[in-house]
Image: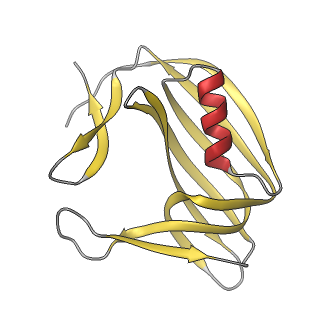
């Protein structure tokens, strides 16, 4: 286990409109407001979304299993983080979404579109040493905490 302490900074309330992309919107906000670390709470609906729904099996490095949920407007709620990766804000979000025919949980990929609205609350983390760095064993950019 590794950990560090941070302090809360600014809090942003963001509305992502029908047809827009949440990750793209968060990247624009993070760059404009110079966010280097933050937590993200979000809810809303999406017209379609591509998710990573766990690995195919429990081996390392993990083989990502992706699922594309299309033409199936779904309500969702999620949580995420922003940390620097290669000195740029990197958005990492997990959502649970569903409607009367499906329920899915996974890592939200960039291939998605908001249906009607998404409400997003971003809480800045100050004095935070966490970043994302490449892990050769996992073949992923993972959280790294400097002491």
Looking at the picture, how far across and down is residue 127, in whole percent?
42, 13
Pinpoint residue 146: horizontal percent, then vertical percent. Answer: 24, 22
Q: Is residue 51 left or right of residue 113?
A: left
Quarter of the rendering containing residue 70 = bottom right
Query: Which residue corresponds to the image point at 56% horizontal and 67% vertical from the top-left?
Result: 50
State the residue at coordinates (34%, 20%): 129
Q: In the displayed structure, does residue 80 sit left or right of residue 147?
A: right
Colouring = secondary structure
- Residue drawn at x 62%, y 67% is 49
Check the picture and name the quadrant holding the N terminus: top left
Percent coordinates x, y for residue 116 in the rendering: 84, 59
Residue 68, quarter of the rendered image: bottom right
What percent of the width, then of the height, locates residue 125?
A: 49, 22
The front one of 91 and 94 is 91
Up/down of 6 relative to 42, above or below: above
120 relative to 15 in the view: left or right: left
């Amino acid at each position: 286990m590794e950990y560090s302490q941070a302090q809360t900074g600014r809090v942003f309330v963001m509305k992502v409109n029908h047809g827009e992309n949440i990750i793209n919107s968060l990247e624009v906000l993070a760059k404009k407001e110079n966010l280097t670390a933050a937590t993200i709470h979000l809810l809303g609906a999406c017209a379609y979304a591509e998710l990573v729904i766990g690995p195919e099996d429990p081996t390392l490095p993990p083989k990502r299993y992706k699922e594309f949920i299309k033409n199936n407007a779904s309500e969702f709620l999620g949580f995420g983080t922003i940390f620097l990766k290669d000195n740029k804000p990197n958005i990492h979000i997990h959502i649970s979404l569903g409607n009367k025919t499906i329920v899915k949980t996974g890592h939200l990929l960039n291939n998605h579109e908001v249906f009607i609205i998404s409400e997003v609350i971003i809480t800045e983390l100050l004095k935070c040493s966490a970043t994302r760095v490449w892990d050769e064993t996992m073949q992923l950019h993972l959280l790294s905490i400097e002491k």
